[in-house]
Image (cartoon, rainbow, N blue to C red):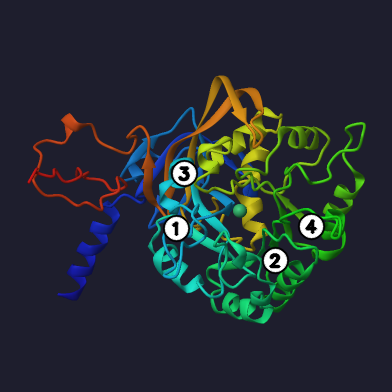
Amino acid sequence: MRYPTLFLLANAVLAQPSYDLLLKGAHVIDPKNKISDVRDVAIRDGLIAAVARDIPAKQAGRVVDVSGLFLTPGLIDLHAHVFAGSDGVGLAGGESSIYPDAFALRAGVTTVVDAGSSGRRNFAHFKKTVIDRARTRVLAFLNIGGVGMPGDDKEQNVGDMDARGAAEVAIANRDTIVGIKVAHYRGPDWTPVERGVEAGALANLPVMVDFGEFRPERPFQDLVLKKLRPGDIYTHMFYAPVPMLDEQGRLLPYLFEARKRGVLFDVGHGGAAFEFRQAVPAVRQGFPPDSISTDVHSGSINAGMKDQLNVMSKFLNMGMPLDDVIYLSTWNPARIIHREQLGHLSVGAQADIAVLRLERGRFAFVDSWGAGMEGNQRLSGELTVASGRVVYDLNGRTRDRWDKLGKYQPQGDPSWDGTRGGARPRPLTRSR
Ligand SMILES: [Zn+2]
């Protein structure tokens, strides 16, 4: 009886579609693989299964027409604050962290990197209450301060900046911790930067620095020319106090020197750290960022920053080509945090995908000081897939029409994600 059973099984397998989901006809931008052209993208078992010019529709359980749109790897936001809620002692991550699923997926972001909201004393709590529960992939820079960013004087406590302790927590959590963060320091000395770099060296991880208060005792030029190592990151590159231009409005040469050394420059827009009068000349004169990130928190999300796509749109309207804007929001941030398995659409990669609409019209954008800039292009989120699951679908593209589904059943599978054939609607919840 063995052989006939096997034979039947083989037949059943052959009759199954090869792919769970097929996204057809978008302009695919995949900078790692040097693709910027119309392609179909097929997904199976949560992974990218094929990227090709014409994948037959009959090979997929569900086919979605995304022509006229751009399809990119799921975006990576290198600087976010998502330690929301309480750490059991006080407000975690200050009062401004927000839960990642509340803002990321709808903007095409499938990976956020928390920038130091937690430290070695409360990282475990952060992991349990946010990281392990989010659908958005959350990675983290661990703050050199023991309790991260409570938003008070505890952040200034140099006595609680323990390089060895931070490195130990980072090493024990290599799956999640991608670097060390130094931030918000007001003192005249280099201690936090030095402890951060020491922890980074011990754990073999990059350091991201928010320089806090700019002080003459520790010049910014020394940070990027002497203190940081190749592969370390300065975030908030378009913050007003950063020495950027000379009297004639030309970029200062030390910036290029720092870049040549391998120091990386991240946007980290946030509520106060992005000015057009810094960013526009920098982009025009050949000093673009290495990564486009939000520094999202409950303040910046409602101010000039808004979301990852809005920040990306600013760079588009400053004249940066779309392919470059995508590169700085996908593959390059993945490389910066040494997560080369993310940020691209290679076959076998996690199926993290953003489908974006490039709107044309009259728009305007706002910086951290309330200045405006007009533009004629804006990116918006249309469809987001995370590890093969549809997690955001603005126009119901993955859904069957309501009048094609037959009789509503009073049961259903609430986890149904729209990727399988034989579609089942979401359960009809009866009012109780
Ligand atoms: Zn920040």
Looking at the image, do the residues carrying marks 3 and 4 touch, with CB atoms under 8 Å apart?
no
| Mark-to-mark CA distance, 2 and 4 | 10 Å
Asked whether the viewer can see residue 42, the reply is: no
What's the residue type where badge 1 is placed? Ala
Classify residue 225 as left or right of residue 367.
right
The answer to whether residue 315 is above or below residue 178 is above
Residue at 49% x, 60% y is 138
| Mark-to-mark CA distance, 1 and 4 | 30 Å
> Few, some or many C-alpha atoms within 10 Å of disc 2 (few <14, some 14-19, many ≥20)?
many
User: What residue is shown with label 4?
Assistant: 263
Image quadrant assignment for residue 337: bottom right
Q: Of label 1 and label 2, which has the lower sequence position?
A: 1
Q: Is mark 4 within 8 Å of ligand 1?
A: no
Quarter containing the N terminus: bottom left
Looking at the image, do the residues carrying marks 2 and 4 touch, with CB atoms under 8 Å apart?
no
Q: Of label 3 and label 4, which has the lower sequence position?
A: 3
Q: Of label 2 and label 4, which has the lower sequence position?
A: 2
Q: Of label 2 and label 3, which has the lower sequence position?
A: 3
User: What residue is shown with label 2?
Assistant: 206
| Mark-to-mark CA distance, 1 and 2 | 24 Å
Image quadrant assignment for residue 204: bottom right
Q: Position of residue 32 (x, y in %)?
A: 64, 50
Looking at the image, do the residues carrying marks 1 and 4 touch, with CB atoms under 8 Å apart?
no
User: What residue is shown with label 1?
Assistant: 84
Q: Position of residue 122 (x, y in %)?
A: 50, 72
User: What residue is shown with label 3?
Assistant: 41
Residue at 72% x, 49% y is 290
In this view of the protein, which residue sits in the foreground, 286 or 179? 179
Q: Nearer the viewer, mark 2 or mark 3?
A: 2
